Amino acid sequence: MKYQCEGCERLVPVEAFRIEDGQLAVTCRVCGAKTLAGPPPSASPGAPVAPQEVSREDAPGPRGGDGAAVALPAPEVFVPPAPARASVTALRVVRSDAASIVAPAFDGDPFQAPPGHCPKCVAPMRDDAGACAQCGLVYANFIPDEHQPSGLLATEWHALMGTWHDWDAHDRLLSQAMVRGELAMVGRLYRLRLARAPNDAQALRGRDEVVRRVTSAAPLASDGPSPALARKVKNTVMGAVLVVALVLVLVLFQILRGSF
């Protein structure tokens, strides 16, 4: 059982207590303040009763006589102390400082660059430039159909918007796009999202994950020739060696024949 100390306002467990004037007294072990619980001493039912004055007519004395009134103490009646009321624990509302996660707003066409960005590489564009300084695209020659995702990827991207804060959904889409060879298009979709929401943590993480997967897959593709190409080169070399050996044998035969 715990109670709230009136001195330091902490919730302190009750280790020891005592009864003072019919009240429960508890001393805080942290700050040493004493906390009382129960009715005030003036209202305590166990307070002694003041003596009452009675006359001789109501209470005869030990000897006869007329007379005089005497003060007799009232019989003391033992009244058990009132039980201490249960400790009341003060409840405090704890408010979290963490901001609630708000679903991002997806406005505009998710497959088109917003105004002020290159429609191909999504880099910021200058007003006085007719071409992108980053990818070299001449804006007048841009063909939107050449930079659209496949139908399957577009469907998966629309479904991802409904579970945008679930990173497992992003990871599954990245893995499927990597198998189909659409990882570069997924990276473009993440850049399009960042052009509209630069502080989107999921889009930043997705773009960096695309770069990581592309760079880790590039060395694997250049480890060496394919097995079919290796066999072809080996057969060519063996044929050349056989031709050279045959020519040497013929030359040696002609030399030996001329010597006789």
Image (cartoon, helix red, strand yellow):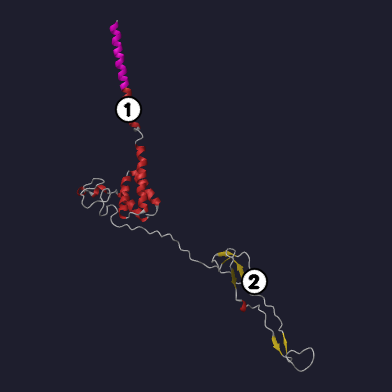
**Local crowd at mark 2 within 10 Å, few (<14), some, or many (≥20)?**
some
- Residue 182 visible (yes or no): no
Q: Amino acid at mark 1?
A: Val
Q: Quadrant of the N terminus?
A: bottom right
| In the foreground, 191 or 245 | 191
Question: Residue drawn at (36%, 49%), measured in percent from left and top?
Answer: 206
Q: Is residue 203 left or right of residue 49?
A: left
Sequence-wise, the earlier of marks 1 and 2 is 2
Question: Residue drawn at (38%, 48%), measured in percent from left and top?
Answer: 172
Q: Disc 2 marks which residue? A: 19
Q: Where are the magenta residues, as a range? A: 240-259
| In the foreground, 3 or 111 | 3
Q: Quadrant of the C terminus?
A: top left
Q: Is residue 203 above or below residue 214?
A: below
**Local crowd at mark 1 within 10 Å, few (<14), some, or many (≥20)?**
few
- Residue 211 visible (yes or no): yes
